[in-house]
Image (cartoon, helix red, strand yellow):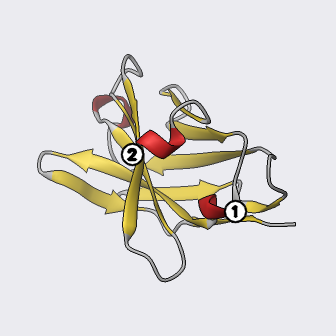
Amino acid sequence: EVQLVESGGGLVQPGGSLRLSCAASGFTFAEYAMSWVRQAPGKKLEWVSDITWNGGSTYYAESMTGRFTISRDNSKNTVYLQMNSLKPEDTAVYYCAKVGDYGWDYWGEGTLVAVST
């Protein structure tokens, strides 16, 4: 059974940092690209970042470029999202997702990030 478990969310002040983690199990993690996506209150799902199976290439949504960094440790079956210079508009539930042959095929339950004074 595929499982993705996010952690690391919380309340942070504007300008602060958080590091999200996503622990994966139930599939051969090192063979798949992974994504982070987010959903802000009352808004549609928004793609954040992708990382290829070996971490060799990373991709970011324009508004996150330069502030967020995705990485992975295939020995730990874990993907990370380092978020710096956080803004109130980054407030959302953050999900990691496994990239299958036709797009995202498995999701975690998400971790809430709240950026506020």
- Towards the viewer: 84 or 78: 84
Q: Is residue 36 left or right of residue 78?
A: left
Q: Is residue 81 above or below residue 13?
A: above
Q: Residues within 10 Å of mark 1 (few under 14, many from 20)?
A: some
Residue 69, disc: none
Kindly identify the residue that appears in the image at 80 percent across and 54 percent down: 14
The image shows residue 53 at horizontal and vertical percentages of: 33, 27
The image shows residue 66 at horizontal and vertical percentages of: 57, 30
Q: Quadrant of the N terminus?
A: bottom left
Q: Is residue 71 left or right of residue 3?
A: right
Q: CA distance from mark 2 to mark 1?
A: 22 Å
Nearer to us: label 2 or label 1? 1
Q: Residues within 10 Å of mark 2 (few under 14, many from 20)?
A: many
Amino acid type of the residue tagged 2 in the rendering: Ser
Amino acid type of the residue tagged 1 in the rendering: Pro
The image shows residue 67 at horizontal and vertical percentages of: 62, 36
* Residue 97 in sight here: yes
Tally of marks: 2
Kindly identify the residue that appears in the image at 24 percent across and 58 percent down: 105
Kindly identify the residue that appears in the image at 47 percent across and 47 percent down: 24
Q: Is residue 110 above or below residue 6?
A: below
The kind of secondary structure element at disc 2 is strand
- Towards the viewer: 25 or 4: 4
The kind of secondary structure element at disc 1 is helix
* Residue 1 in sight here: no
Q: Is residue 13 left or right of residue 71?
A: right
Residue 35, disc: 2
Q: Which residue bears the numbered disc 1?
A: 88
Residue at the extreme top = 56
